[in-house]
């Protein structure tokens, strides 16, 4: 419920994208609202606006659009946990988790996540705002965030923003400024990132410690994209996809009755064992595997994937995900399945081919998210502009070189005994598969000395598991439990 709107102008700087179209660079709009969470009334302020990005010389080079929710009827005040939230892409606005997962508002969608009209948002009775304040941050060129021209009208180089390490550096600096402005240095701090945001928060964990002297209680990765796996390909990457094939095939009732009759969580461990101990060595041998063994593996792979032995052999046991999305239902309905959430169905121009024409789940999500976020910002948060809200923004040729983020997280954990990690994945996510997320978690700490500080939660949905109402409840409860159990409660930070 909205009670009042006040306008707080912090500074008068503005930057322009054309002669007349301008957006403020250091401005906040504040509204006061309440929401019922877990049957308790939570009063909060919603602050939306812009905060500059400063370079090493103190010059403004960009301004990031953010929305900050702060509970106002909590005696903990500044000692309440705060969560810095990012989506991924790279080039994706922080819209998905903002109005569909952790925030005080969620999309008006059906219980399985499909769009309904009229579009919009409603109160989120599962939000974690009851236990933690949240700021949703939009990196450069996402949402309303943009680079800022200098006095001569020149924009800063893309290299300052559009790459794994550049992204981590400027965002960590921005977070330092935000924490100081909002007087949150005493608060337990968490960072959460979805998809590419998983890579982002792994890198931020160490950058915040080493360069901003900001220590975290928790790192949360939602359907994380680990590019050490995704861009590697080969036996490792391909084998890690197999348990996802099992999950998607089970959902669409394409598995043999022996597996189909069991619960999903009963059969996934079987598929995981096959993937690591049998399929990976077979693909590793390539063309030097015997024909007998190759046929044997294809039969087992067919058993766990719902694909025919023939097409598996035609792919030399190395079945790409894009082919799986096209092939699984080809002979049953002639339809395709979704990439980010394989519960969704698509219709291609022709049934032949090796990849779908489009991603049915993404078009469905854009169907409901885009009108909702634009309406919500303008009508409930009070910010109005003619500048386009970039659900996806242009981030040029993203620099993926020198990716040390996985080891960065390990180092941050080693240096900080408080730091714990939670990974959340959907079993039907075919882009950043749940088993790849498990593998990444295993690889962060090869010593095993910190394994009791890693936690994994899986859900019967896809990349955005929270779009399914049952998983919206469960995943928020898992976040709530993780946060409450990573608070130190007076315990010293030592081994």
Image (tube, helix red, strand yellow):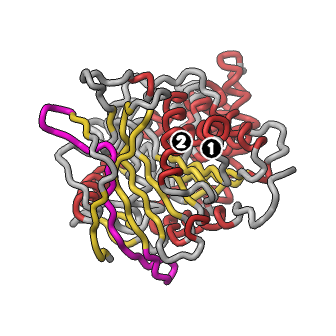
Looking at the picture, tell me which residue is in the foreground, 78 or 385: 78
- Residue sitting at x 32%, y 36%: 146
Residue 179 position, x and y percent, is 53, 51
In the rendered structure, find residue 432 and report the number of the disc placed on it.
Answer: 2
Residue closest to the far right: 495
The magenta segment: 17-43
User: Is residue 247 visible in the rendered structure shown here?
Assistant: no
- Residue sitting at x 75%, y 46%: 416
Q: Quadrant of the N terminus?
A: bottom left
Left or right side of 62 for 424: right
For mark 1, what is the residue?
A: 437
Q: Are marks 1 and 2 in contact (CB under 8 Å)?
A: yes
- Residue sitting at x 38%, y 42%: 64
Left or right side of 171 for 370: left
Looking at the picture, tell me which residue is in the foreground, 436 or 287: 436
Looking at the picture, tell me which residue is in the foreground, 97 or 325: 97
User: Magenta includes 355?
Assistant: no
How far apart are the two marked residues, 1 and 2, measured between alpha carbons? 7 Å
How dense is the environment of label 1, judged by Cα within 10 Å: few (below 14), some, or many (20 and up)? many
- Residue sitting at x 60%, y 22%: 402
């Amino acid at each position: 419920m909205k009670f009042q709107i006040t306008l707080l102008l912090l500074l008068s700087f503005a930057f322009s994208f054309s002669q007349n179209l301008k957006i403020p660079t250091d401005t906040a709009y504040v509204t006061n609202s309440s929401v019922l969470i877990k049957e308790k009334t939570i009063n909060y302020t919603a602050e939306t606006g812009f905060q500059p990005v400063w370079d090493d010389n103190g010059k403004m080079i960009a301004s990031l659009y953010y929305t900050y929710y702060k509970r106002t009827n909590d005696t903990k005040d500044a000692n309440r946990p705060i969560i810095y939230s990012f989506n991924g892409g790279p080039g994706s606005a922080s819209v998905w988790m903002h109005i569909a997962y952790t925030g005080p508002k969620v999309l008006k969608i059906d219980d399985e996540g499909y769009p309904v009209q009229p579009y919009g948002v409603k109160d989120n009775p599962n939000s974690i705002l009851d236990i933690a304040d949240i700021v949703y941050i939009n990196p450069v060129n996402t949402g309303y965030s943009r680079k800022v021209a200098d006095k001569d009208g020149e924009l800063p180089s893309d290299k300052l923003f559009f790459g794994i390490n550049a992204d981590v550096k400027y965002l960590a600096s921005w977070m330092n400024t935000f924490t100081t402005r909002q007087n949150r240095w005493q608060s337990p701090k968490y960072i959460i990132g979805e998809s590419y945001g998983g890579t982002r928060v792994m890198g931020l964990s160490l950058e915040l410690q080493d360069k901003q002297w900001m220590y975290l209680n928790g790192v949360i990765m939602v359907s994380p994209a680990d590019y050490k796996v995704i861009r590697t390909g080969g036996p490792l990457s391909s084998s890690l996809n197999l348990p996802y094939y099992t999950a998607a095939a089970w959902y669409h009732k394409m598995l043999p009755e022996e597996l189909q009759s069991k619960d999903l969580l009963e059969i996934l461990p079987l598929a995981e064992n096959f993937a690591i101990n049998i399929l990976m060595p077979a693909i590793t041998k390539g063309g030097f595997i015997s024909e007998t063994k190759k046929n044997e593996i294809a039969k087992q792979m067919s058993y766990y994937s719902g694909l025919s032995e023939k097409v598996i052999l035609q792919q030399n046991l190395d079945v790409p995900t894009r082919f799986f999305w096209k092939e699984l239902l080809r002979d049953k309905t002639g339809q395709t399945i979704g990439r980010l959430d394989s519960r969704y169905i698509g219709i291609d121009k022709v049934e032949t081919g090796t990849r779908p024409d489009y991603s049915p789940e993404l078009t469905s999500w854009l169907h409901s998210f885009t009108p909702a976020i634009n309406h919500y910002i303008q009508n409930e948060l009070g910010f109005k502009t003619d500048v386009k809200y970039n659900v996806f923004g242009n981030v040029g040729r993203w620099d993926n070189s020198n990716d040390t983020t996985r080891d960065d997280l390990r180092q941050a954990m080693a240096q900080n005994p408080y730091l714990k990690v939670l990974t959340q994945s959907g079993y039907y996510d075919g882009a950043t598969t749940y088993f790849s997320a498990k593998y990444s978690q295993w690889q962060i700490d090869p010593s095993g000395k910190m394994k009791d500080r890693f936690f994994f939660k899986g859900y019967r949905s896809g990349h955005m598991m929270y779009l399914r109402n049952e998983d919206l409840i469960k995943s928020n409860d898992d976040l709530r439990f993780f946060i409450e159990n990573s608070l130190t409660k007076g315990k010293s930070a030592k081994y």
